[in-house]
Amino acid sequence: MIGQLSELVANQRTFVSHAAHELRSPLATLRGHLQLALRRSRSADEYREIMEESLGEVESLIALAEDLLVLTRIQGWIAPRESSTPPRELVREALRMARGPAEVQRVEFREDFAEIRVL
């Protein structure tokens, strides 16, 4: 039991470390864009370009935050062995979580639950 708890704590620390790194990168980029925009006067087109790049970073942060929330929900569903959450909901959440990275890679997928069977 102690070994399992130790492994769980280690896994959680690794996860938090990875999540912090994933948050830090877009935040650092966003800060750089904003500092650059404030450094000197720019044309409207230059400001527009900086704002569009910054918006892309904000979108990445939002997607990451949504993914973390989904992981939290999934962990809540998995922890109790006798969960009443339908498997379709779990699959639907997993697909929603994968949708952002899939769009970046230009991958399309659809939800087709006709194939899902509960054993």
Image (tube, rainbow, N blue to C red):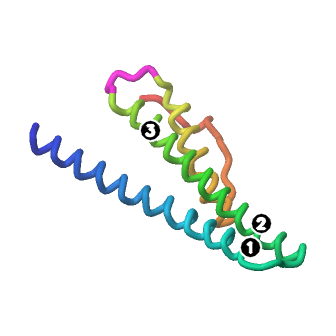
The location of residue 51, given as percent across then percent down, is 77, 66
Asked if the stretch drawn in magenta spans residue 98, the answer is no
Q: Amino acid at mark 2?
A: Met
Quarter in which the C terminus is drawn? top left
Say left or right for 45 vs 69: right
- The residue pinned by badge 3 equals 72
The location of residue 17, given as percent across then percent down, is 36, 58
Q: Amino acid at mark 3?
A: Thr
Q: Residue furthest left?
A: 2
- The residue pinned by badge 1 equals 37
Task: Decide whether the magenta segment is chiefly helix, strand or loop.
Answer: loop
Secondary element type, mark 3: helix
Say left or right for 46 vs 3: right
- Name the mark on residue 52: none
Q: Is residue 87 above or below residue 46?
A: above
- The residue pinned by badge 2 equals 51
Q: Amino acid at mark 1?
A: Ala
User: Are the residues flagged by discs 1 and 2 in contact, CB closer than 8 Å?
Assistant: yes
What's the CA distance linking mark 3 and mark 2? 31 Å
Secondary element type, mark 2: helix
Asked whether 35 or 17 is in front, the reply is 35
Quarter in which the N terminus is drawn? top left
Q: Is residue 28 above or below residue 85?
A: below
Residue sitting at x 73%, y 72%: 38
Residue sitting at x 82%, y 78%: 41
Say left or right for 119 vs 39: left
Circle nearer the N terminus (1, 2): 1
Residue sitting at x 56%, y 63%: 27
The magenta stretch is: 80-84
The location of residue 23, given as percent across then percent down, is 50, 59
User: Are the residues flagged by discs 3 and 1 in contact, CB closer than 8 Å?
Assistant: no
